[in-house]
Image (cartoon, coloured by chain):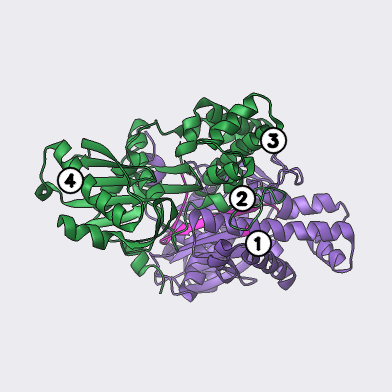
Chain colours: A purple, B green
């Protein structure tokens, strides 16, 4: 049995995956804040999901943890997990001894990409080892994970899928990265909330509601969100030519208001351009269902991988 | 021995590659116009390069042809090779019987990408099977070929690397594809020549010269060329995270005038953005030397591939 954790800013999703790949246990816990509490949450989540599945820790061969931060290649070290109050943490080294189980750590978007490939790829008839998909995470930031033939495409230096910082408008809003008109500056929940500038628990939802009510500033922000998401879809298909782009992350909670806007953007470029029309982009985008265990499932699969990223060790002399 | 042909609008470059991968013969011929003459040129080029290498046709196990057009996956059929006067041609079926040798056909940018990976990757210490590179062709149009771990990345539907039609400026010039601000609309030799609108054998060189002399329209066009090329480099690294982007194609004949402009664009985004700076893009771009046999070499390697694109046959059910 393999356990996967998806540690988000508010909750941690844990699954047990059996040798055939089926999810046979699942629990959700509140995520603690800061390094010590993150470690404590991870250990508690593994114990709780084992109980849920009716197994012991001895039955677990590996634990994989997806977490929103940068992971140093080939290590279990997390940096810049700002939503979790973690600046730097050797998560694998802290969790593994407490459980007596090998632990691997991966960026949560990459984990979700792998899980979504398994869940959605099978729905599309992908062979487990032949097919390609990008998972485009629309959260505070915007980033994608790319899966090709059943494996995460990590790239040469770990920046594959960082489409959020591609500029698609030199006159667009300044991005927190310092450039202008980045996809993330248009579509990232953090950037939209900052430009909206009004308090609220769900600022992007507020923007969409205000836009629907006719507020000009909100309409401009809302149009930018769809423009950025559509641009990301085009970039992923025109560069990596993935068969499918699966949207996920907090902004997909906006539902049809978001997906309808994105479809309209893609339809407009298909209308303008026979070449874009030939790509059939509208048919190649779908949304990960709310509550999908994709990220935790992907983390479980990463935890069970035998070899720790051989490409990154051998890639360049 | 394997033969590779790079059939361009004016000349055809032919090489003989020995089993160790070394080029042991090379000739260049004028390329004929239209389907019949293209077939005749291909057959003549194979015979001529065999003579140059001192071998007979019996010594050639395969012929690969790189050609500027669309290739129907899994076939030797070329469409839309407008620079060669070919609307539709089953090139492999026409050439193979005349030579008695198996023939494979590939888009010339993809062939050049594979050849550049071999030639430049070895210079960068890439392992033949571990490393990633994009070849960005700057010619009449703009397109890239991506090579990962020694193999062409073809993508799900054959559009991998079509970065020329990613829009990076909603207020940019209209592209022949129908969108606005495409990378190709900024940097494609055809688009620049059309916007310049003055006769001349080398319109982009004329634009660069006029820009250097202070002509405002030429300066704007020239700035757009560098902006589009830099955008393509960023897209390729942020999406596919290739280690290296090799520039080739007719526009690279502009030499330091072009590469200096592109380096300045990349330096400006690195200056604005610590994230972009961390990517070290300026160090990851280089130019294919003039007269490089990359495309013909890549064609030879494609011709010798044993299995005709198994991914495309099996990919999606």
Pick the front one: B195 or B255: B195
Pick the front one: A267 or B120: A267
Query: Which part of the image, by quadrant, shows the C terminus of chain B?
Result: bottom left
Q: Secondary structure at mark 2?
A: loop
Whether residue A254 appears in this view of the structure is: yes
Q: CA distance from mark 4 to mark 2?
A: 41 Å
Asked if badges 4 and 2 are on one and the same chain, I answer yes
Mark 2 sits on what residue?
B182
B282 left or right of B49 in image: right
Q: Nearer the viewer, mark 3 or mark 2?
A: 3
Which span of residues is magenta-colored? A137-155
The number of numbered badges drawn on the structure is 4
- For the point 50% across and 53% down, the residue is B162
Whether residue A65 appears in this view of the structure is: no
Residue B24 x %, y %: 19, 35
Mark 3 sits on what residue?
B217
Q: Secondary structure at mark 3?
A: helix
- For the point 62% across and 65% down, the residue is A270
Asked if badges 1 and 4 are on one and the same chain, I answer no
- Vertical order, B55 against A292 (above or below): above
Asked if badges 3 and 2 are on one and the same chain, I answer yes
Mark 4 sits on what residue?
B47
């Amino acid at each position: 049995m393999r356990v996967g954790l998806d540690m988000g800013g508010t909750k941690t999703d844990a699954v047990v995956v059996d040798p055939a790949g089926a999810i046979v246990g699942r629990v959700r816990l509140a995520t603690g804040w800061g390094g010590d509490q993150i470690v404590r949450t991870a250990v508690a989540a593994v114990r709780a999901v084992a109980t849920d599945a009716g197994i012991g820790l001895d039955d677990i061969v590996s634990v994989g943890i997806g977490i929103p931060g940068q992971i140093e290649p080939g290590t279990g070290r997390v940096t810049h997990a700002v939503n979790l109050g973690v600046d730097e943490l050797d998560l694998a080294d802290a969790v593994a001894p407490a459980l007596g189980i090998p632990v691997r750590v991966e960026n949560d978007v990459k984990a979700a990409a792998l899980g979504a490939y398994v869940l959605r790829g099978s729905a599309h008839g992908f062979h487990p080892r032949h097919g390609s998909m990008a998972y485009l995470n629309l959260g505070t930031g915007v980033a994608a994970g790319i899966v090709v033939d059943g494996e995460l495409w990590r790239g040469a230096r770990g920046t594959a899928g960082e489409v959020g910082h591609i500029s698609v408008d030199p006159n667009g809003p300044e991005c927190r990265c310092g450039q202008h008109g980045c996809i993330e500056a248009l579509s990232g929940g953090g950037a939209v909330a900052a430009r909206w500038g009004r308090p609220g628990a769900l600022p992007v939802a507020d923007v969409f509601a205000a836009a629907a009510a006719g507020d000009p500033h909100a309409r401009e922000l809302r149009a930018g969100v769809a423009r950025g998401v559509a641009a990301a879809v085009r970039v992923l298909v025109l560069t990596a030519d993935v068969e499918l782009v699966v949207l996920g992350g907090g902004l997909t909670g906006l539902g049809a208001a978001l997906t309808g806007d994105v479809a309209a953007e893609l339809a407009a470029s298909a209308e303008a351009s026979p070449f874009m029309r030939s790509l059939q982009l509208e048919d190649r985008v779908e949304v990960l269902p709310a509550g999908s265990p994709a990220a935790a499932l992907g983390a479980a699969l990463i935890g069970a991988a035998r070899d720790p990223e051989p490409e990154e060790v051998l890639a360049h002399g």
